[in-house]
Amino acid sequence: MARPSKLTDKQWQEIRKRLLAGEKPSDLAKEYKVSRATISERGSRTVGNIKSVANQLVAAESSLRALPVTEQLEALSLADELRAISSHLAGAARFGAATSHRLSGIAHAKVQEIDDAAPLDEESLEALKGVAVLTKLANESSVIGMNLLSANKDMVKQANQQEPVQPVRVFVRVEDASRPEPQAQ
């Protein structure tokens, strides 16, 4: 297990902001009295992820602007629908998990009705049937949540196996400046 950080979460947040603003890891390491490797390992990796996602968002926005207005509206509408579907599935998973939890609790209470000395007598068999039905319903209630967790696990595994996304260079047109220069973001 890794040793706890000397820096607080708030300090790491400040370091990320400053790295994003272009400050050097070595300067920050001196200021916060940690090694450059500490800043580079944790801060630079996180900043790299942030920049990668930001570049993907810029590229997506650029692609959206390249479409005719009607297609832009259709793409935005579809994105809204996909977000709604995702939100509804997450809600269904949450409710399914809660239902599964409650049914499992009821099944557990029903187990107390089984006579350990005579598990096959009439009363114990009725309790066992109730336990079986409740357990089956609990398992079925958890399917959406389990599928979402499995899909998320697969996506994380796939993302970790892929090459990192190369940042997209975006050039901003500067019209008011005396000598416009491209700015990478």
Image (tube, rainbow, N blue to C red):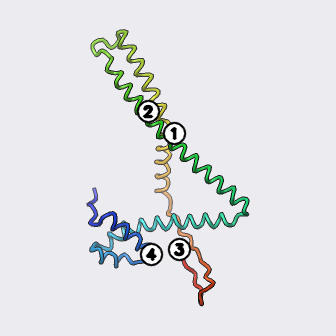
Mark 4–mark 1 CB contact (< 8 Å): no
Q: Which mark is residue 92?
A: 1
Q: Residue furthest front?
A: 176
Question: How busy is the neighbourhood of tag 3: few (under 14 within 10 Å), some, or many (20 plus)?
Answer: some
Q: For mark 3, what is the residue? A: 185
Choose the circle earlier in sequence order: 1 or 2. Answer: 1
Q: For mark 4, what is the residue? A: 21
The front one of 175 and 157 is 175
Residue 135 is left or right of residue 80, and the answer is left
Q: CA distance from mark 1 to mark 2?
A: 12 Å
Could you say whether the residue bearing mark 2 is in a helix, strand or loop? helix
Q: For mark 2, what is the residue? A: 100
Question: How busy is the neighbourhood of tag 2: few (under 14 within 10 Å), some, or many (20 plus)?
Answer: many
Residue 121 is left or right of residue 53, and the answer is left
Choose the circle earlier in sequence order: 2 or 3. Answer: 2
Q: Position of residue 129 (x, y in %)?
A: 42, 17
